Each structure stands twice: as structure tokens, then as C-alpha cells.
Image (cartoon, rainbow, N blue to C red):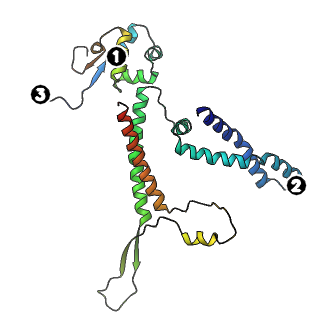
Amino acid sequence: MPKLEKKLKILNRLQQLRQKHHLTQEDLAQAVDVTRATIIALEKGNYNPSLELAFRLAQFFKMKIDTIFYLQGNKYE
Amino acid sequence: MNKLIRYIQAYLLFSLPFIFTDFAFSLFFPKTELTYFVQQIIGWNIVPWFFVLIVFLIMLVVIPQAREMTLRRLANIKERDEREEYITGKASRVTYISTLSLLILLLFFSMFSITVERLPKTQNLKSPHHALKLGFKFSPFEDLQSFANKSKNNIIFGYEKITLSKSSLLLILLIWQLVIFNLSARKEQKSGC
């Protein structure tokens, strides 16, 4: 079996999506019921969200999770 | 229960200025009839305040809700969303392990003694000049004899300090931490985490 890397770097397109929808970090935070600090951490890539929060973000932007979150080296990078 | 805890918190907090004023009156103001009168009026609150404080401190140990409501603020625990919960979890882990190591170190220091002594000089040059003594002592209670002497008086009830020794206290804290952590971890696992 192929061995996976020990730590996977997950990136996201949250900042682009948020700006595309003309939302502030506070707006997005309120929409998905988290603090603004969490949105900042997510956009900077300092924090990986739980599956639940990832689904909530995907639901909010009406997108699939893997178009918002992707692994380093994938097509959206 | 939450309401009761809130009432107790408010009572303890808002009565605090009266307690301090009373102490200030007894310490800094000259004893006149007026100051005595004012002190008496303010001081009626001291006995119930101390009684409620003792009850509240016991509640903090026994009732998790009381702990959550009071110590969350004191410990500056913020858990508004999952990221903050994650941070709290990480910080708790670090705190738990570091406290455990500190308790073990303190327990070691309270039980073991190390002494380096200078030995009396002898004619024999080859004889050792210094001696290293290592000791071990664990007594569950602190200086029971002095406590017993005090109790010979006509005191019906007295409370000065916990009679447990430092070692016992540290051991209790160690066991407390280990048991509480493991029990709460098991509870979390059972709840579906």
C-alpha cells in the first residue's frame, strides 16, 4: 500500500470566495456561527476546520467541500 | 441551581466592599464610639459572608456547574466556537502535564532530604571530610503533637490550618488530577467523542 505523508497541508479558497461574495470576515463568521478570529485563522491556513464547519462553509457558499478545501499541490492552488 | 450560584456569587462579590471597610475600620481608624458604632453596623455581615464563602468554596469542588460558572472567568477560558475549544483542549493538556510534573517534583522535595555535612577532623588523612545523607520521610499529618497540645485547652472547635502534611496535600492533588482527568476523558468517550 502506498504510504501517505505524515502531515497533509490543507489549503482553502475562503478568502477569494468571501471577497467574491462581498462579505466581511465578520459577516462570514456570523453566517457559519464562529468567531472572526476563526475565519482569520482559516484564511491564513493556521487552522483546519472540523468536518462540520467545512460542511457549513460549503453549504453557505453552495459548493462542494473539495472545491473550497484542497490539498497542497492540487489544481486550485 | 444556576440561579442559586448566581445569587451566591453576587452576594459574595457585592458584600466585599463592606468586609474591606470593616477591616479598614478595625485597622486604621481610632476607636471611638462613632467608629465602633459604624463598625458594628457594617460588621453584621462578616459572619454570614464567611459562612456563605465556605459553602461556596465547597460547592466549587462538589458541583461542576458552580465550577464552570465561576472559574471559567477566572481561568479566562473562552469556548465560543470549535477553534477556541481546540485551543482550550491543547492548553489544558499542557497545563495538566506541566502541573503533574511540578507536583511530582514538589512531592519529591517534601519527602526526601539531602544533607551534606562536614565531618570532624581526624588524624587519618584518608578518612572522608564530608558526608552526604539522603533521607526519606512521609507522614500523613503535620506536627500532630503541637495540635494535640493546643487541644488541651478549653477550645470546643478550632480551625487554624489543614493538619495534613505538605506531602499528603501534594499526593492528594496528584491523585485528584489523575482521577479527574481520566474520569472526564472516559465520560467524554462514552458520550460519543
**SS at circle 3:** loop
Secondary structure at badge 2 equals loop
Q: Position of residue B71 (x, y in %)?
A: 54, 39
Pick the quarter of the image with the C terminus of chain A.
top left
Q: Nearer the viewer, residue A22 or B99?
A: B99
Taking the spot 17% from the left edge, 28% from the top edge, the residue there is A4
In the image, taking residue B66 as reference, residue B99 lies left or right, namely left
- Residue B60 spot, x, y in % from top left: 55, 43
From the viewer's perspective, is B22 left or right of B60?
right
Q: In the image, are marks 1 and 2 on the same chain? A: no
Q: Amino acid at mark 2?
A: Thr
Nearer-the-camera pick, B10 or B81: B10
Q: Is residue B88 above or below residue B153?
A: above
**Rounded to the nearest whole Å, what is the CA distance between mark 1 and mark 2?**
73 Å
Q: Chain of mark 2?
A: B
Which quadrant holds residue B3?
A: top right
> Residue sitting at 44 percent across and 50 percent down?
B176
Q: Which residue is mark 1?
A: A55
Contact, CB < 8 Å: mark 3 with mark 1?
no
Q: Residues within 10 Å of mark 1 (few under 14, many from 20)?
A: some
Q: Which mark is residue B32?
A: 2
Query: Of the residues tagged 3 and 1, which is closer to the observer?
Result: 1
Residue B16 is situated, as x and y percent measured from the top left of the image, at: 70, 43
Q: Which residue is mark 3?
A: A2
For badge 1, the amino acid type reads Phe
Residue at 54% across, 69% down: B144
Image quarter of residue A40? top left
In the rendered view of the protein, which quadrant contains the N terminus of chain A?
A: top left
